[in-house]
Amino acid sequence: MSTQAVPRSRAITGFVLSAFAVALCPLAMWLIDAELIAAGDTRWRTATITLAVGTHVIYLVSFFRARYADPLILPLVVALNSVGLAMIYRIDLTTSADAGESQVMWTGVAMGAAMLVLVALKNHRVLRKVTYISLAVSIVLLLLPLIPRLGLEINGARIWVSVAGRTFQPGEIAKITLAIFFAGYLSTHRDLILLAGKRVGPVHLPRFKDLAPMFIAWLVSIGVLVFQRDLGSAILFFGLFMAMLFLATGQITWIALGLLFVAAGGFLAYNFISHVHYRISSWIHAFDPEVYNQPVGGSGQIVQGVFGLASGGLFGRGWGSGRPDLVAYSNSDMIVTALGEELGLLGLGAILMVFLLLVSRGFRAALGVRDAFGKLLAAGLSAVIVLQLFVVIGGVTRLIPLTGLTTPFMSAGGSSLLANWVIAALLIAISHSARAPQVVDAFSDQDAVAGSIAASEGHEGATSVISRISDEQANAAGGGR
């Protein structure tokens, strides 16, 4: 038996970086309006205490339950949450809203949920046992907003449920359960998808029955568009499946088929779903005042957001010096434009770099973990953040139609914040499995088995067997811990 070199836990590094991330919130609020804070405004204190307590409780739980986790994931998430709280606080000052207080409350709830995930999830491999349960839960969550008296329609989209006077978006949780289902399904059927079917020249054509999951994902996306009238969620769900399918197989053929499904679905949605038709028309004709006879172009929200980004320039107008109140939903759907106006291109670029670091650490955990399920789950959850950020920024900059999705960890919205903190907790747990020291055989039996198969079936068959044996050993190890 041989032992891998024991990696450092780097717990002190994570603690120091987390403390700096928490400090961003009161510092930004002080820069926004120092006189108001000096006059006795206590909102900054509530936000700081919530962040500090939640962050360090999660840190302590991680120290005992996931000591070898990536030390950068938690500080990066806290930094984004801190800047988001400060921006919502700043917008509240000009709009007389109280979204900041609600966001602080949801921050505490989301951090508590992340802590519970780290406590309950001893090994991420146990989630593979609930692959099809996750699919059933996803379907239930997506159907909840359609139930009479429970579902709630806001701004033309029926994606919320109302419970005890508060609204919640079940689709935010569904993206996590769908990622678990896709990871479990693809890790089990990867070899079948890769090897079955016909090959015509360099193109691998999968069997028709292997197209069933993609067809189901396409139908779910169209169903979300038709019944819930939510373009953003439809793009996110189908994009998640396509990203995980490509990560599992590496086949460009599947991506091409997925694009065909997207083109067909987009054509049908534009011509037969009024909500989608309006979204696309307001995107194309945003600056045309004759389309909908509005005072500021075909979409006042998009136009004012673009003007806000332009007025920020390179260095921004400074905290508290912009006019984010001129943009509708500036604290949720359009918070990127508010940040760009007051922090400028450099400040917004720094925020995007934080997202880049967070996603890269998620993919780093996917590369380091040994089992295929963990690899796909970490990569899929990281892809969710990328897709959601792309859809949001693409919408506010008129690259793609505006969809109404929220910026992860930053926009006002309790369900989005809760779901993204759970994603962060899952990435922390998976990164611990990737970096924790493990005892391995110096020469395992699987090498001999793979060698004999390689002699008779070729390298591709041996590689497939190695992957399968490794997964079985990893699952056995996970079940015995």
Image: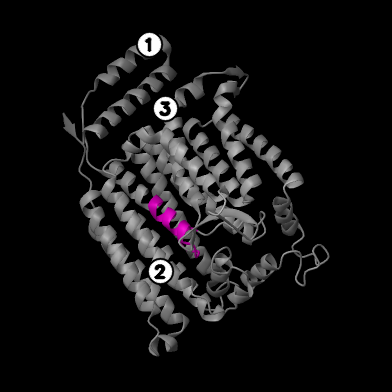
- How many other residues sit within 10 Å of disc 2, few (<14), some (14-19) or many (≥20)? many
Return the disc, 3 or 2, that comes first in the chain's sequence: 2
Residue sitting at 46 percent across and 49 percent down?
A: 173
- Find the residue positioned furthest to the right: 290
Residue sitting at 32 percent across and 72 percent down?
A: 49
Coordinates of residue 361 in the picture (x, y in percent)? 39, 50
Mark 1–mark 3 contact, CB under 8 Å? no
Residue 206 seen anywhere in this rendered image of the structure:
no
- Find the residue positioned furthest to the front: 149
Q: CA distance from mark 1 to mark 3?
A: 25 Å
Residue range (magenta) = 408-423
The residue type indicated by label 3 comes to Thr
Coordinates of residue 241 in the picture (x, y in percent)? 53, 38
Q: Which residue is tagged 1?
A: 455
Q: Which residue is tagged 3?
A: 188
The residue type indicated by label 2 comes to Val
Residue sitting at 28 percent across and 27 percent down?
A: 473
Question: Image check: 277 left or right of 112?
Answer: right
- How many other residues sit within 10 Å of disc 1, few (<14), some (14-19) or many (≥20)? few
Q: Quadrant of the C terminus?
A: top left
Is 381 placed above or below 441 here? below
Q: CA distance from mark 1 to mark 2?
A: 62 Å
Q: Which residue is tagged 2?
A: 104
Task: Name the front one of labels 3 and 2.
Answer: 2
Q: Secondary structure at mark 3?
A: helix
Q: Main secondary structure of the magenta part?
A: helix
Residue 48 seen anywhere in this rendered image of the structure:
yes
- How many other residues sit within 10 Å of disc 3, few (<14), some (14-19) or many (≥20)? some
